[in-house]
Amino acid sequence: MTHDDVWRAIERFATEHGMSCSGLAKCSGLDPTTFNKSKRWSKEGQPRWPSTNSISKILASTGAKIQDFTKFIEVGDTTER
């Protein structure tokens, strides 16, 4: 499972719930920019992974379980979205 796999899962999860990544963040009580593509990498080029707290909040706000989220992780999927 890679950094990109997890971020794609968040994008798919948001879409499944009829929201953009920004909408999902807002619905979950997070800053609307939390899941922006521009925040996925540091200025030094290091990957920034979503926090477990952020994942927990999106699960709580949608009533989903962790298994519901992990089904969107497709390891090694290189399909452009």
Image (spheres, grey):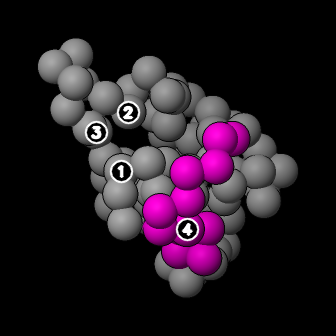
**Mark whose residue sits in front, 2 or 4:** 4
Task: Tell me the CA gap for discs 3 and 4.
Answer: 19 Å
Task: Tell me the CA gap for discs 2 and 4.
Answer: 18 Å
In which quadrant of the rendered image does the N terminus lie?
bottom left
In which quadrant of the rendered image does the C terminus lie?
top right
The mark nearer the N terminus, 3 or 1, is: 1
Task: Tell me the CA gap for discs 3 and 1.
Answer: 8 Å
**Amino acid at the residue labelled 4:** Glu
Q: Residue furthest left?
A: 44
- Between residues 78 and 74, which one lies in front from this camera angle? 78
* Residue receiving disc 2: 40
- Which residue is located at x 68 percent, y 55 percent? 12
- Between residues 74 and 50, which one lies in front from this camera angle? 74
* Residue receiving disc 1: 3
**Amino acid at the residue labelled 1:** His
* Residue receiving disc 3: 48
Determine which quarter of the picture holds residue 38.
top left
Instruction: Label 4: state its secondary structure.
Output: loop
- Which residue is located at x 55 percent, y 68 percent? 74
Task: Tell me the CA gap for discs 1 and 2.
Answer: 9 Å
Where 80 sits versus 12, above or below? above
Decide if residue 53 is in sight here.
no
* Residue receiving disc 4: 74
Marks 3 and 2 close (CB-CB < 8 Å): yes
Task: Tell me the CA gap for discs 1 and 4.
Answer: 11 Å
Span colored in magenta? 69-81
Where 50 sits versus 1, above or below? above
Instruction: Label 2: state its secondary structure.
Output: loop
